Amino acid sequence: MKSWIVTLWSAGALVLLPTFAATQLESLTLDQALEMAESLQPELAEAKARVDAADGRAQQAGLFPNPDAIARMESARFRDPTGEAEFPVGLSQTVPLGRRLSKARQAELLEREVRARGLEVKQREIRRRVHSAFATTLYQEKAYQAQTEIQQNAEKAAATTRARVEAGDALREDLARVEMELARAKVEASRAGSLHQQSLVELAAAIGDAALSVKSLAGTLEAAFEIPTLETLAANLPAHPEIALADADVRARNARVDLAKAERIPDVKVDFLYRRLEASKENAFDVGMSIPLPLFNRNQGRLREARAEVAAAEARSRMTQNELTTRLRQSHLRLSTALANSRTLKTEILAKADTVRRGAEARYAAGDISLADILPVRRDWAAVQLSYLESLREVMHAWAEVRPLSAKN
């Protein structure tokens, strides 16, 4: 694998990391993950190689055909093969007519453009997948931290209840219920930890190398998003790579129609030979020309195929436009809704849930309320924390869908 030197900031320290696959990546940022994917993702390498292959075909398509060298013996007798035989030698050159070479080169150049546009589409798709995987990993990391905090609170509650049981202020049944809550919190924390590790593996795969060891991320789910208006995004759609790919495909298919028309005109073959007349000991030359007669094969099938491919490409272009418009409207609505929900949870619910829990815990510690009263409060607080994290993940996922539809990605 290509060796890299990557600069990562971790706890204010500058760290140089060579060779991704052999390195444990700490405090990986989204921008660094996107940059790594540009070089490591095999799908991009394949797409780039296909562009290069199309370059080679375009170069080959414009070349004039090589001449044929001719050397033969004619009019040789069985008794004395060389006595009065003739020895023509020369060249035979095929001459393409109907601008076939230029049409073939133009068709391959347009195919190359199709591959290049496809590479742009693939790059945006890879960036979207990395962005989405990064958001999921960041969410799972924060969820694991939240579940760990919930477990710690459950441990404190169990210690408090145990002390009250020993003091005779609570029943052992209450302690059993609190310990059940603690066991449940440990299970959820373990599950969240496992999901976090799985998301790190999936992020490495999205970057393009499953052997990468990503240990931690640097970033926050609470990013500030400036949502472009739906009208602005719609105005940018004609410049989207998928639209450009569909348009290039239509032009490439039309070029194939032009090539199929040019191929209906047969090639001319011109022969020029030097001949030695042994009988008279004289030198001579032959000039000839041959041309196929288009009696049986007039390339009608190829022309029909090319025209059908044009119709198919035009239909795909319309489908692409419809799909992008649908994705744009859906992802913009999803992002707007997710942002509104996360802001509501943050401004109207989170702080109040903290206030309710702290007050209830103080009253429970003082013996003013029972365990039956405090347990729903704790569960509600934990659910609110996780709901807020989930809403932030939804925001990042929605932004990962909207971002590729903007003019610049």
Image (cartoon, grey):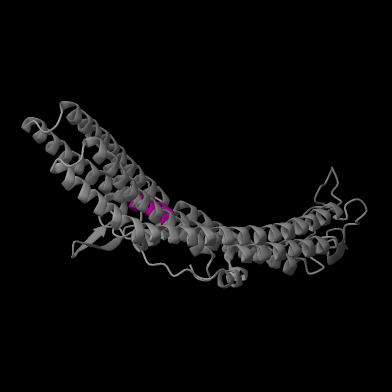
Would you identify the image quadrant in which residue 275 lies?
Answer: bottom right
The answer to whether residue 271 of the structure is visible from this angle is no
Front in this rendered view, residue 249 or 380: 380
| The magenta stretch spans residue 128 | no
| The magenta stretch spans residue 134 | yes
Task: Please state the horizontal and vertical placement of residue 99, each as a whole percent of the image.
Answer: 78, 69
Task: Please state the horizontal and vertical placement of residue 195, each as a whole percent of the image.
Answer: 34, 41
Front in this rendered view, residue 178 or 279: 178
Front in this rendered view, residue 282 or 144: 144
Q: Which residue lies furthest to the left in this view?
A: 167
Residue at image position (49%, 53%) is 43
Task: Please state the horizontal and vertical placement of residue 220, each as a whole percent of the image.
Answer: 32, 60
The answer to whether residue 380 of the structure is visible from this angle is yes
Residue at image position (31%, 50%) is 385
Q: Residue furthest right?
A: 295
Task: Please state the horizontal and vertical placement of residue 135, each as a whole percent of the image.
Answer: 38, 54
Q: Residue furthest front?
A: 368
Number of marks present in the image shown: 0
Front in this rendered view, residue 39 or 177: 177
Left/right of residue 297 with respect to residue 36 in the rendered view: right
Bounds of the magenta segment: 130-138
Left/right of residue 149 with respect to residue 105 in the rendered view: left
Would you identify the image quadrant in which residue 287 lies?
Answer: bottom right
Q: In this view, does 387 lie above or below 258?
A: above
Residue at image position (85%, 63%) is 265
What type of secondary structure mainly makes up the magenta span?
Answer: helix
